[in-house]
Amino acid sequence: MIDIPPYPPLDPSNYDLIVVGTGVSESVLAAAASSSGSSILHLDPNPFYGSHFASLSLPDLTSFLHSNSVSPPPSPSSPPLPPSNNHDFISVDLVNRSLYSSVEISSFESEILEEHSRRFNVDLAGPRVVFCADESINLMLKSGANNYVEFKSIDASFVGDSNGELRNVPDSRAAIFKDKSLTLLEKNQLMKFFKLVQSHLASSTENDDSTTVKISEEDMECPFVDFLSKMRLPPKIKSIILYAIAMLDYDQDNTETCRHLLKTKEGIDRLALYITSMGRFPNALGALIYPIYGQGELPQAFCRRAAVKGCIYVLRMPITALLLDKETGGYKGVRLASGQEIFSQKLILDPCVTVGLESLSSLTDQQNETLSVLVPKSMINKEKIARGVCVIRGSVKANVSNALVVYPPKSLFPEQLTAIRVLQLGSGLAVCPADMHVLYLSTLCDNDDQGIKALLSAMSNLISLPVPENRQSDSVVENDTSETKPILLWRALYVQELVKGEFGGTISSMPSPDGNLNYNEIVESAVKLYEKLMGSEELFKEETSPAENTTEEENDGGVEIED
Amino acid sequence: MHGRKREEDPNPEETAAKALELRSLQSQFMSNHHQKIYTKEAIQLSAKLLITNPEFYTAWNYRKLAFESRLDEDSDTSVVNSIIDEELGVVKNALERNIKSYGAWYHRKWVLSRKGHYYPSLENELQLLNDYQKQANQKQDDEKQDDPSRNFHAWNYRRFVVELTKTSKEDELQYTTDMISDISFTIYSAWHYRSVLVSSLVAKKADGFMPKETIRRELDYVHSAIFTLEEKQSGWFYYLWLLDQTVKMETPLRFSSWPSDGSIIILSGPDCFNASSSTTKLTTFCSESGSFPLILYFDQAVSGVSSSTVTIDSELKDLVWEPVSDKKNSQVDSCVWVARLKCDSREPCFSRKETKVKVSLGGIVSSMGCNLTAPYEFVFTLRIHDTLEGESSQQESIVSWTDDLDNWDDDALSNDLHSFIAFKADTGFEWRKKAIKIEIEHFRTLPDSKIGKLILARLLMAEETMIANGVHYKEILQLYNDLMALDSWHAQYYKDEHSVALIHKVTSRTESMSRHLFRYRSMNNIVCLRLNNLTLSRIAAVEKLLFVQMLDLSHNEFHSAEGLEAMQLLCCLNLSHNRIRSFSALNSLRHLKQLRVLDVSHNHICGELPVDTTRYLCSSPLSNSGETGREVPNKYQDAYLVLRDLMKLKQLDIRGNDLIFAGEEFSSFVRHVVPKLVWLDGHKHTS
């Protein structure tokens, strides 16, 4: 453990809002609230910005995952203090909840990696990209946070199968035209379907043209997968639309295992997001972009916006206890690790912060109600997400550096219940050294084994996994055939719990990184919380001043996002 | 312009100031131009003017004059090149202002095409154009903006530069592939350029460009475009061009004739229709004055049919060939050519009862450049009936069309019929049949598309003309019926195509054809082809109907007699109960010299001078008065132009029309124009 130099006491010690954790949702909220004039203290126990959305070097990532996985080390500093009564407050001790389990990190070429270890910016919550038209981009433009981040486009997206083949996702008319694997009829059907969606969207936004084709209300309420069948789309195309464009997770054809059967309405919304993303920014080739230096740049950009508006930032500063009013049981403030007590109207907490069970038992009902969002809920059918990070030499597809690969349910093995998404990023995005790529994998799962198994299957499909020493001699021939596959240098596998955020009046909690490919839901939850906290106050009312939107000259294919 | 909204000028003062500046520039320039001042300053002034307004054509002309005068002064190569560079620079700047400026593009071309100079940086032009076209096209996805991909100026200029630099056609073909694949597959110009390149590569038989594989490759390539976005026309244009090539490339010119090869023609006297002594055969022809027509029908328009290209071996005299067309000389392009054979008994060959005539064709090339297929010759036998020399008498009885018709029951005549409608298959060119077959399979998978149905119908027709097994007609007719319901805007077109298919179906087999053949008892059992009540709107397959002398097309939907002119033997024609609207729609009947009976009753002929746009295409309306020759009341003009040539017409029925001038005056006009007329509107003329 690094010795933290003692902090000078914070001044002032009273705020409208204390935010703990610098993940995307916390940062968006801090930026929005500071922009509307609230005084905010934004804390993070870690020495970096981003919390669970951070981009880290390989050693930092390793230690973060280990320290946040099952059985956290008991707080070394102090024996749990009994609720102190020497003030007007009761203090309730907080503990860290671990989000990660089954963490397994292996390095296969330690020397090379150590040499370059600081040149990696590896995402904790990968794979995750930004759709050019998604809510996070809109919010960045609105807040002016876009001035602090630069994006590059994801060059290609593919659908993978168990034979190791990667086929282009035909997502635009040019892509459909060029595609060699679709039959002529499939091209025709797919394009017709896209046009139907476009015409539906046009008619719902302009609503003046009666000639445009609209999807009927009845169809909008039925399952999307049934609607696609009704449109006579063949299974191959259905699967492309469902999993590689609408980015669904669960097998829509299997009603038993499908936790989320998408309605046509939602499906159309997802397609609309994809379609409007294409061509929104001149330099973006497709629908997807990614921030240079990793996704950790996004929360940081919002934090910088917040700081400009007077939000106070303190990193490496955990909170150790909550302070409640002795009489009413209401929330008053927090005790920092430095020992200082800070007061605020409201408090927003990172999903990892929770109250120890033994502390809870001694509380009154009123106090319990104040802390309601922190009480761990026992959930049936807990949904988790398995994530994997691989550092590889070579690329999964020749001549393509930044690419998304989707394995639809059942595409790799019959028991595969959910889609597996793989994102490959290259040195052009400043996330790894040249000639290497970082591969992110994720899939939703019910338990750790199931998730890890699916990820390993996708990995072995894309890259040649190192063979244990004793078996190497047998598999020389095998190695020859898979020579073109990239080689694995480093790997991390972990399973992350999916925790939802909760509004609890004075104390609210934020969600953990979700299972989606983009930030839409995370940003939406932050916006919703903002509205609950601030009432109807408009988000980033007067932020975009033209002076801040200065266009820079072309910088090597970077995507400049602007209004 | 082009439906775009004019935007409100955000800054009227600034615009006014600009206009003022432009006007002063213009007046300075004009004074320079008038005084022929070609100093450096003056030339720079014109450049400044052009960059502000590239559409000022006078300024481009001025620069051309200045350019020439400067070149006269100095012929040093480096100076010349720098002057050229300067001109190109001005054009480039002007194009940045308006990439579709005619004057600017033309000026660039003019500068580079000056004789005697080879501009060393010409190679750069192509590179410049590459970057320029690709860059311009990338913006094309925004449909609301002026679409730079539709810039045919740049494509034209490209062809010009390619010519100058002798860039290989193969490289240019690759360029169009890149443009189509990477930029947009809906660029008309790219597809068009591709068609030019492909046809030229195929024509010179370049390596890897044999017709068979080239067409297959291109068809497969364009499929992606038309199946992906079936409503974008650019791909279809290219596809239709390819189909045309598939059907036409290396296809020989075909012809049919009357008399047909191997047939025996019975030449009978003028009264053979009235006589009851002998049974008329399909090949009996009634001749007045002992002559009969020799008809050649080509499937493409040809010119130059004359006694030197068509030779006859018998002792007959050289023939005079005339096209069935308004103009009568051998240079006219026409599908039908007629010569009259005169059987003069004083000639030794006609003293015999039977004569064999051999006709050979050579050196006839169609306007499309196709050569005649083998056999280049045909032989027929002429059998002359005794009554040939008989006196011609007035035909007294009226042809009723309804009574006296007997079903066709004569199997013996089927052989004759077969020789008329037999299919003459092309040998070889199997690749073409295969190509069409593959296309049919593809388009059967496009079930809901209008254009897909139309193309499928056309492909099926094309296959029918190649293999003629008659299996597709049912499907073709159904497709056109579907199309009529689907696309009422073009219903008439589909109806016409439906008629064509139906007639082809009827004429495809002896059995189906004979169901429509009858004998007309009161005219010596003359053979009558009845295609009535079939919703026909257009005649087709005339190459198989050259023998028809009596034709019933009543109760159909004909709006014009176009196409009937090829049936030169027609003597009785029933067009009653159709949709003919004017006399001028009957214009092609003028060429039917044998016509004796014409029924156009119960149509919509109104007699008003119609707004007939085709007439203005050919000649001015004033020229009609010259053609008339003698005094004809203006209101009968159209009727006169049709009737005056029908010299043999004996029976005319024009009742039940919307004539505005029916009555005695019109009747006497008709009798005046057609002196041989006996029956008018069912009444016998008694003089």
Image: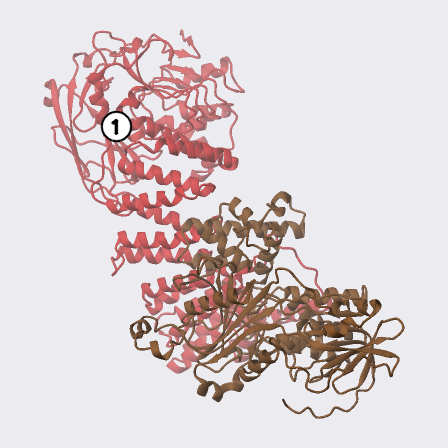
Tell me if I can see residue A116 in this picture. yes
In the visual, does A68 lie left or right of A111? right
The amino acid sitting under disc 1 is Ile
Q: The brown chain is which one?
A: A
Q: Which residue is more in the foreground, B661 or B174?
A: B174
In the visual, does B353 lie left or right of A243? left
Q: Which chain is red?
A: B
**Residue drawn at the location 27% of the way across and 52% of the way down:** B211
**Residue drawn at the location 66% of the way across and 72% of the way down:** A24
- Label 1 crowd (10 A; few <14 / some 14-19 / many >=20): some
In the visual, does B75 lie left or right of A312? left
- Give the letter of the chain under mark 1: B
Tell me if I can see residue B97 in this picture. no
Query: Quadrant location of the N terminus of chain A?
Result: bottom right
Tag 1 residue:
B421
Q: In which quarter of the image is residue B389?
A: top left
